[in-house]
Amino acid sequence: MKIARFTTPGEDPRYGIVDERELIVLAGDPMYSGYETTGERISLRSAKILAPVIPRSKVVGVGLNYHDHADELGQTPPEAPLLFMKPNTTVIGFGDSIQLPPDVGQVDFEGELAIVIGSIAKRVKAENYEDVVFGYTIANDVTARDVQNSDGQWTRAKGYDTFLPLGPYIENEFDWSDATIETRVDGEVMQRESTMQMIHKIPELIEYVTDVFTLLPGDVILTGTPSGIGPFTAGQTVEVAISGIGSLINPAKNRV
């Protein structure tokens, strides 16, 4: 089942179940209110799809979680998950513009599968990981590569406003074990890999992350990007597609 967060003219953001070309409107946030519906249906064409979640507290990224990606960066895959953080102000939704700051040099796309946490998660054992997962969505972990290299750490390079497109929907019935991630820039395929190639799998990631941080409903874990990362520039469009979820499409423009 795909869950959308959306708005229509003059209305506050709401949630709905995607039913082909319509949204079945939910009575509240499904993380807290379940799947009670209002009886209203809205055409997808008349709704603006928003980022499916704005994390309450944090976005946790996982670096170098595909062997080929570590190889292309000339780094050794870490024995334990390599964690970093992105502020929730990086989050934008489907169709929103990635705004490229001036004087940062190369900005790269990184297509990823994202986990959306559905309940308070603290020291969760790997075998119980499903208890705290609300669903899965698509992410683009945009990174200012020159800044990352010059700073020697990742916070600024990954933390600019608009540097985390998420969406378009949350899929809560998703087999993450062998889904295809494909990233295109202006239609040209740049990344294509199966989630089967993750070094640290999702149960392990949730156990590791929640041993460090207590996660809250709506928080997000980014599971890492496969090889093929590369730059994009203003005027180009980046699309990240994951089989079973959909496509996340965002244009890029220079920040004013």
Image (spheres, grey):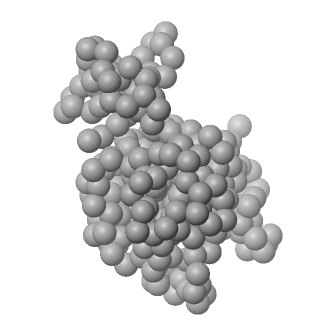
Nearer the observer, 188 or 250: 250
Q: Quadrant of the N terminus?
A: top left
Above or below, 210 against 139 in this view is below
Q: Is residue 147 visible?
A: yes
Residue at point 37%, 41% (across, down):
169
Give the residue furthest to the left: 20
Q: Quadrant of residue 157?
A: bottom right
Q: Is residue 224 left or right of residue 76?
A: left
Q: Quadrant of residue 25?
A: top left
Residue at point 37%, 31% (across, down):
34
Q: Is residue 221 left or right of residue 136?
A: right
Q: Is residue 22 left or right of residue 69?
A: left
Above or below, 123 against 228 in this view is above
Residue at point 37%, 78% (across, down):
197
Residue at point 56%, 39% (across, down):
54
Q: Quadrant of residue 70?
A: bottom right
Q: Quadrant of the C terminus?
A: top right
| Residue 86 x %, y % | 66, 54
| Residue 207 x %, y % | 53, 68
Nearer the observer, 95 or 222: 222
Nearer the observer, 220 or 228: 220
Above or below, 223 against 89 in this view is below
Q: Is residue 6 visible?
A: no
Give the residue furthest to the top: 10
| Residue 66 x %, y % | 46, 78
Q: Is residue 206 left or right of residue 239?
A: right
